[in-house]
Each structure stands twice: as C-alpha cells, then as structure tokens.
Image (tube, helix red, strand yellow):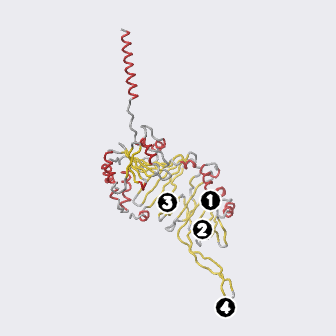
Amino acid sequence: MYRKFLTLVLIAGSLGLVLFVRSFLFEQPKTPRLLDRLPSADFLGKANILELAKETNSLLQYNKLSMRDFTTYEFLLGQGKQYGIDLESNLYIFVNENGNWGALIRLTDSSKVSLGIERLSKYSELKDSIVAGNRYYYIAKEQSYLHYGKDYALIYQGTDFIKTLNQVVSAHYGAQQKVWRRFLRQKQFKDEHLVFYANWPKLKKFDVETAMFAHDSDSLGLRLKSYIKKRTPLYFSLKSNGLTYLSNVQTDRLIDIHLDVSEFKQQRQDSVYVQLAKLSRKIGFPFERFMAAWNGDLVYQEGGKQVQEVRYIETVLDEDFNETEVERVRLDTVPGFAVLTSLNRSAPLFIGKLTQKGLLRQEEDGYRFLFSPLLHFQKSGPYYQYFSAATSPRLARSRQNQVLWKYKGTKYYFTIDKLTRYEIFGSLQIPVKSILRRNKLV
C-alpha cells in the first residue's frame, strides 16, 4: 500500500513538473505596452489632445482663427473614431536638441488608419517602404514618417527614423525606459493636459535634478509654467523689495532682478556660480568682480526714443575766408536705454575692470556700454544708474523678479514666482495676437 501511494505521488509530481516547464518554455510573450515602446530623448512630453482642445477653445474663438471649427473637442473626437485613433488617451512626445522629434499614440482600430493614409496621399507626395518587415509611410521632402502597428501609431520628423522605428518595434513588455518612468511619476503638473520633462544633459552642469513645463491658456494668450529642482541647494533667495524702473508701453526689454545673494557669493564651487563664471569669461565680463560688488539688484530697460543734445565743432569761413572753429549743437534721436544696479564698497574696482576691458568707456559728455548710446551717470546711495534720457527714468519699489523681452513684435513676459531651498517656480506669458498676425492667421 505504501509503495502504491509513493508511486502515485511521484507520478503526480512528475506530471506537475512537466506542465510547469512546458508552460514556462512555451508561454506566449506579452505584447509591449505603448509606454514600453517610448524612446528616450532630451525632452519628453505627454498631451491629452481632447482636453487640450477644450482648454484652448476660448483662445481660438476669441481670435477668430479659421481653423477653430476643426479643433473643437467634438470634431477631434469624431476624427479619432473615424481613423481608429484613441484621442481620449495620452499622446506621448519625444524631442531631441537637434530638432528630431516624434510621438506615439494608442490606436483603437488599426484597420481604419489606412483611410487616413489614403486621404493624406491626396494632399502630399506620400511614399511607402519596408524595413525588417515593418512598413512605414513618408514624405521625403519634409523628412516626415508614419508607422503603425496593431495598437499604436508612430509619427516622426527628423533624420533618425530607422533607429527610432527599430526601438519602437523591438520593445519588450515591462521594459519601459527609466527616464519615462521618472517623468510619469512626477507629482508636479500631474493634472495638466500638456506637460514636458527635460532630460537634457546640459542641465546636469547646473545640478538640475528635475525640470518640467506645463501649458495653460486663456482667450488672450498662452502661459508656460515651469518647475526646476536642483540636487544641491539654491544659495540665493528673493529680496523683499528693491528699486526698479516703471515700465510703460514703449518698453521693449526689461530685466528686473532683486535677489539676496549674500550666501551665493560665498559658494564659488556651486554649479550655478561656476557655469555663470564660465559664460562670463566667454564675453570678457568680470563676473568675480561683479559678484564681489553686487548687492542683488539689477534692472535693465530698453525701448522708445530719447532726444539728446550733441555738441560738435564745425570749421567755417568768415568774411575774409579765414577758417574759424565754431561749437554747434544738434539734436539726435537715440534708443531709450537705462541700467540700474545696487553695489557695495567694491563698486569702484568692478567699474574700473569694466573700463579696463573696454566694456564701459568714458567720454567727455558721458559714458557708453559697448554700442549703447551716450549715457548719463547718477549715483544715489548704493544705486548706480546709467541712462540715455536727459533725466533718470521714474523709479518705484518692487519685489518682482521678471524679464520682459520683445521678439519679432511679440512681448514675452517671464516671472520667478517662488523660490525654495531647492526649487524654482516660474511662468512665461505669451500673448498670441501679434504672433497670429505675423503668420497671417488672423
């Protein structure tokens, strides 16, 4: 009886072992998820197209863009269903510094994609090819590519399509890139509909651990929110207030900085200090002398026009045809220009270094910074000013840290909203009216 029982146990155990080994050896591999197929890049992004359409609808309607009826939630949802594209899921974007970029999106029915390709071929010179058994479509002139599988579609523009395609099609289940895993685990901007994450190697020079950007919009423009976290502390903080120039409609460029840099000055090995020093040496700016003298306020304003009296000597002939030198005055129109900074007792050493390097030149009637107009000088307490107007621009108290920069007719406005020991929160305002006009969209 004992032998029979032992024999049954051995047979059952052997059968179980065979079944286990068989299931292990002949198990069908799981299909890679969309997240497993995503390639690494310098910048990563995710977007929910339908929710983004809702968010930007007021901007498109307010500016009466001709395309506004083709970017509504309802229209895009219908187009997605017609061509088998899951627009209710996230679109994932990857961008490299060299300009190459791509995107992956989920498909609900890959058999419908051919309808979209057929329609696209009517408007573009679309060709197709096969590499390693994978078919793709492309527009050679624009270096644009499209490949799709059973449950995903790859869109790409750039010079490394074949390499990217191989990465996408050869992915394995659960083999998600670590950088994508870090990005998608971030708590910052988790509820935003368009978010970018920087994986840019150059940021490591500044000890940046995380850099992220998110999109907002209203009827007047776009707002790009930014978040930066360093591995090492920020050795500067926001000052409670400082002097600044009053901005006006003529202001094209404004840099308005008010920081407590007392600790930063002592941290010469800090990555930010080191990199700023390197950048300064490239243009010959005496950064170390500046930091030794600087009290943390720096304001630069440019815009509008100023009228200056320019005295000059003219040689004339008198009644007897004798040459006589006569001093005359003419009125010249020059750009509006002003700079203000707070300096300590080391200011003369810093200004002397600027003069020695030719960055600041003293003339009979004033001063010039490189190619600036002739400037007047004024000192009030710790504040040093140089300005092209006859009198100093109006001053006001400010605790803002901001940059206003006009480029191709559009004024971009950046602010530092908050600083912590390791984090920087900021935002960039982009008014769209002039951009749309420049590109003849309105």
Question: Counting other residues with Cα less than 10 Å from the Cα at mark 3, is it few (<14), some (14-19), or many (20 or more)?
Answer: some
**Mark sitting on residue 413:** 3
Q: Nearer the viewer, residue 252 or 46?
A: 46
Q: Work out how far the residue at label 4 is from the one at label 2, CA to CA, in angstroms.
A: 41 Å
Q: Work out how far the residue at label 2 is from the one at label 1, CA to CA, in angstroms.
A: 16 Å
SS class, disc 3: strand
Which numbered disc, 2 or 1, marks the residue that appears first in the sequence? 1
Residue 442, position as x, y percentages in the image: 38, 64
Q: Work out how far the residue at label 4 is from the one at label 1, CA to CA, in angstroms.
A: 54 Å
Tell me whether the residue at label 3 lies in contact with that at label 2, contact meaning CB atoms closer than 8 angstroms: no
Residue visible at 67% across and 57% down? Answer: 289
Which numbered disc, 4 or 1, marks the residue that appears first in the sequence? 1
Which numbered disc, 4 or 2, marks the residue that appears first in the sequence? 4
| Amino acid on which disc 1 is placed | Ile
Q: Which residue is mark 2?
A: 372
Which numbered disc, 3 or 4, marks the residue that appears first in the sequence? 4
Q: Which residue is mark 1?
A: 283
Left/right of residue 18 with respect to residue 289 in the rendered view: left
Residue 322's quadrant in the figure?
bottom right
Question: Total marks drawn?
Answer: 4
Q: Nearer the viewer, residue 123 or 258?
A: 123
